[in-house]
Image (spheres, rainbow, N blue to C red):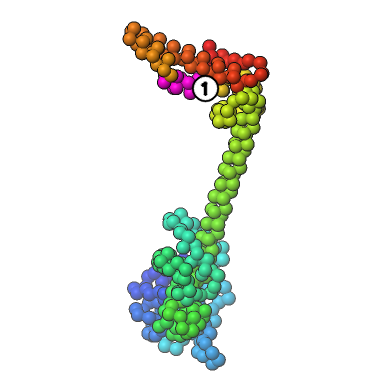
């Protein structure tokens, strides 16, 4: 509605809106059925054709609306609606208003799968029986429909309204006269806003899927790189267990990804030695011989630093033996981490 007409309508002492159409009235009750003389009406729907040949026109005006007028305010004289003022809304303004409403809706509430399913079903038909719309997931869709009705995205009419309300859409009227207890539909504004909401969620879903695909590709590349490095570790230590090679590869992956080049033999040896030293420093104390020696050192009053040095030396000996055995028939290698 144009701002000038909206201000005029808002100033009425009584303001009633038809729940099934866009008409505003200045009379209590149901003035769209039985307006009293002097009742004011603001709407963008006038001179509606009646049903059947020779049926009276609904909301007839005393004269034709101007060519560019989309909204009008008129007074009921008892026979026709006397035009008082008219106005128009640019299509661009309508689109911006609908877009703004859709943006508010997607930002202010969480849309469930049932909400989107109900919207999609309503967008696919001019009107639907309530029972058909709720089929399949009655509880979830019932909540969604109640929410859409509260937001006035969807409209609903029951059988009592069939054939009486001239602003009721023809598709809804046909359903009600065909035996449906109630009909649900989207008006023009609701259809545009619902389409924007659905499109926003489709784009959001696409972004999430693309992000998942990228992460999956990154994981695959990381796994491929890790296996490649594990193979390189196995070439340096042919007799090394596979799980140790994978551990060394995991240690080397960040530096390889950062530097963009494969690790050299010495880098592989250093990574393996570092991993095995960490393992043996924790496990060596449980060795019976080492444990007995540590107890004896403690009994003699050796401080913790001395005992730690002894433990680290025994761990280094274990690592030296491992890398020697894992090299097989290849020439020996060493690392500065072994001291």
Residue 98 higher or lower than 38, as above or below = above
Give yes or no for residue 280 being in the magenta stretch.
yes
Q: Nearer the viewer, residue 174 or 254?
A: 254
Residue at horizontal 44%, vertical 22%? 282
Residue 117 higher or lower than 30, as above or below = above
Residue 317 higher or lower than 130, as above or below = above
| Horizontal and vertical percent position of residue 133 | 47, 71
| Horizontal and vertical percent position of residue 248 | 56, 27
Quarter location, residue 158: bottom left
In-image side of 257 versus 278 (left or right): right
| Horizontal and vertical percent position of residue 14 | 34, 74
Q: Residue furthest top?
A: 300
Quarter location, residue 79: bottom left
Q: Nearer the viewer, residue 138 or 19?
A: 138
Query: Does dot 1 land on a helix, a strand or a loop?
Result: helix
Residue at horizontal 64%, vertical 25%? 238
Classify 10 Å Cα crowding around label 1: few (below 14), some (14-19), many (20 and above).
many
Residue 238 can be seen in this image: yes
Residue 44 can be seen in this image: no
Count numbered badges in the picture: 1
Q: What secondary structure predominates along the stretch shown in magenta?
A: helix
Residue at horizontal 52%, vertical 66%? 120
Residue 75 higher or lower than 269, as above or below = below
> What residue is shown with label 1?
276
Please provide the residue range marked out in magenta.
275-286
Residue at horizontal 62%, vertical 20%? 327
Q: Nearer the viewer, residue 301 or 7?
A: 301
Give yes or no for residue 229 being in the magenta stretch.
no
| Horizontal and vertical percent position of residue 306 | 40, 10
Q: Nearer the viewer, residue 61 or 290?
A: 290
Q: Residue furthest bottom?
A: 54
């Amino acid at each position: 509605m144009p701002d000038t007409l909206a201000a005029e309508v808002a100033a009425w002492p009584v303001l009633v809106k038809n729940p099934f159409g866009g008409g505003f009235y200045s009379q209590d009750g149901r003035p769209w059925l039985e307006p009293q003389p002097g009742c004011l009406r603001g709407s963008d729907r006038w001179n509606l054709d009646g049903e059947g040949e020779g049926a009276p026109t609904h909301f007839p005006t005393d004269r034709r609306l101007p060519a560019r007028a989309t909204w009008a305010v008129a007074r009921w004289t008892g026979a026709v609606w006397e035009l008082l003022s008219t106005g128009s809304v640019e299509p661009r303004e309508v689109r911006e208003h609908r877009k703004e409403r859709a943006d508010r809706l997607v930002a202010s509430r969480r849309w469930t799968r049932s909400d989107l399913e109900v919207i999609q079903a309503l967008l696919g038909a001019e009107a639907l029986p309530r029972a058909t719309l709720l089929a399949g997931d009655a509880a979830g869709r019932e909540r969604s429909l109640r929410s859409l009705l509260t937001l006035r995205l969807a409209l609903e009419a029951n059988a009592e309204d069939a054939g009486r309300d001239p602003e009721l859409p023809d598709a809804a009227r046909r359903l009600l006269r065909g035996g449906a207890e109630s009909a649900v539909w989207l008006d023009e504004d609701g259809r545009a806003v619902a389409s924007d909401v659905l499109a926003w969620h489709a784009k959001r879903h696409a972004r999430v899927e693309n992000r998942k695909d990228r992460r999956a590709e990154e994981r695959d590349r990381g796994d491929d790189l890790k296996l490649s490095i594990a193979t390189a570790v196995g070439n340096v230590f042919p007799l090394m267990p596979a799980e140790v090679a994978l551990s060394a590869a995991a240690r080397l992956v960040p530096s390889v990804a950062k530097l963009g080049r494969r690790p050299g033999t010495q880098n592989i040896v250093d990574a393996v030695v570092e991993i095995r030293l960490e393992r043996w420093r924790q496990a060596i104390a449980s060795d019976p011989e080492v444990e007995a020696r540590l107890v004896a050192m403690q009994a003699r009053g050796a401080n913790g630093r001395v005992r730690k040095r002894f433990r680290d030396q025994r761990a280094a000996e274990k690592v030296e033996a491992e890398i020697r055995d894992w090299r097989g028939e290849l020439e020996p290698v060493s690392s500065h981490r072994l001291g």
